[in-house]
């Protein structure tokens, strides 16, 4: 096989801490479709496809550099060293790019595109543009991720350690964008990277795991050594996020049990059924062609001028890490558009300049 033909969308350095003896050769997995635990499966072809990023290997090489930086930080954490500012930066960048580079994200983008196009071309579906192939769509995702680095710079990082006998798991779609403030306080499952309360959840090993979070919305109770002690219920919440976003498999360490994995998978599947991208249409008010209202059923077939809003919808976990607390009062910024509130003034200005 040519070098770099087998390209991983979850790098092997991410799976290695969960493998037997940490050797990177075999790993326990739970397959969602078959609802079956498979012990000691070969790691080599997990979370990979031939030339997933393309056969010119440019993206593969760039990702290898990022993975190397991330692996160095992860190794420090595994021996008990708290992350410094530079370490935190690379953890956030890795979480962002990892979020954008999986088959799970490809599937979600296809659902998003389909939702929007089914409304936009409702009058004549034959006019819908051709589907993008995986590499074209992945290119869009990766470029968007690279441009979005400014949206994670302000996030803080907390490293959670699990107790003995309670371990984090990982999936084939491991970096999870979520938002406690939106889901719990605002009752809104539509949000993005720039939203107040945004955070990434990413397991690093059976212990530890990380959260990159909006410090203006949350406080985290850290120990004197800079780490956060995760209770058993906290670990269950972290693991639930992996099930919520997993595509095919979740992976667990050699000391963990497969007990309860099937029930967790069923809960996650039911929750994800409620989280498909949706598209709303807006039509001009009778009194103003520049002011829009939510359309009534069927108006999208007759109106000549419309605005479309397609939104990702994110799943809600059954709980949140106990050491991650919502601040009582949270300030955020907005300009009245459908994209909602943001954390920083300059993001509003950039948005206005694009209109």
Image: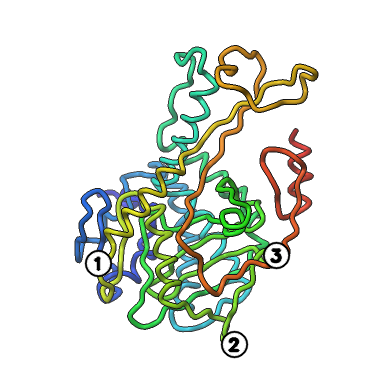
Q: Which residue is labeled 2 in the image?
A: 224
Which of these two is toward me, 287 or 78?
287
Q: Where is residue 151? Give x, y as percent.
A: 65, 54
Q: In which quadrant of the rendered view does residue 10 lie? A: bottom left
- Which disc, if any, is residue 226? none
State the separation of the CA atoms marked 2 and 1: 34 Å
Q: At 51% from the left edge and 54% from the top edge, which residue is drawn?
A: 97
Q: Where is residue 99? Give x, y as percent.
A: 48, 53
Mark 1 vs 3, N-terminal side: 3
Q: Where is residue 149? Give x, y as percent.
A: 62, 54
Mark 2 vs 3, N-terminal side: 3
Q: In which quadrant of the rendered view does residue 83 lie? A: bottom right
Relative horizontal placement of residue 256, taking residue 176 as reference (left or right): left
- Which disc, if any, is residue 258? 1
Mark 2 vs 1, N-terminal side: 2
Q: At 37% from the left edge and 63% from the top edge, which residue is drawn?
A: 170
| Figure check: 115 above or below 86 | above
Q: Which residue is labeled 3 in the image?
A: 216
| Count of numbered marks | 3
Q: At 31% from the left edge and 45% from the top edge, which residue is drawn?
A: 50
| Figure check: 56 above or below 219 | above
Quadrant occupied by the C terminus? top right
Which of these two is toward me, 314 or 188?
188
């Amino acid at each position: 096989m040519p070098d770099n033909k087998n390209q991983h969308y979850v790098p092997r350095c991410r799976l290695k801490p969960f493998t037997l003896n940490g050797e990177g050769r075999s790993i326990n997995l739970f397959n969602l479709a078959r609802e079956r635990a498979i012990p000691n499966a070969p790691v080599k072809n997990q979370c990979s496809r031939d030339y997933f990023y393309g056969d010119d290997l440019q993206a593969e090489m760039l990702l290898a550099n990022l993975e190397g930086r991330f692996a160095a930080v992860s190794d420090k954490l595994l021996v008990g060293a708290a992350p410094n500012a530079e370490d935190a930066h690379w953890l956030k960048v890795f979480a962002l790019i990892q979020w954008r580079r999986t088959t799970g994200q490809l599937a979600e983008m296809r659902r998003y595109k389909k939702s929007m196009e089914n409304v936009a071309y409702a009058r004549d579906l034959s006019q819908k543009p051709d589907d993008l192939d995986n590499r074209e769509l992945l290119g869009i995702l990766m470029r968007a991720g690279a441009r979005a680095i400014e949206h994670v710079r302000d996030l803080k990082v907390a490293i959670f350690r699990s107790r003995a006998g309670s371990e984090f798991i990982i999936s084939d779609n491991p970096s999870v964008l979520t938002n406690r403030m939106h889901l719990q306080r605002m009752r809104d499952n539509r949000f993005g990277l720039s939203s107040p309360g945004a955070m990434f959840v990413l397991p690093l090993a059976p212990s530890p795991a990380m959260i990159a979070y909006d410090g203006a919305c949350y406080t985290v109770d850290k120990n004197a050594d800079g780490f956060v002690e995760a209770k058993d219920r906290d670990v269950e919440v972290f693991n639930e996020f992996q099930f919520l976003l997993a595509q095919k498999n979740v992976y667990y360490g050699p000391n963990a049990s497969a007990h309860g994995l099937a029930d967790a998978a069923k809960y996650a599947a039911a929750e994800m059924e409620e989280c498909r991208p949706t598209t709303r249409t807006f039509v001009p008010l009778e009194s103003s062609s520049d002011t829009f209202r939510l359309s009534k059923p069927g108006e999208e077939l007759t109106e000549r001028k419309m605005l479309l809003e397609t939104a990702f919808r994110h799943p809600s976990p059954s709980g949140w890490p106990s050491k991650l607390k919502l601040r009582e009062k949270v300030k955020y910024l907005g300009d009245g558009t459908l994209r909602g509130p943001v954390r920083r003034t300059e993001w509003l200005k950039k948005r206005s300049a694009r209109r």
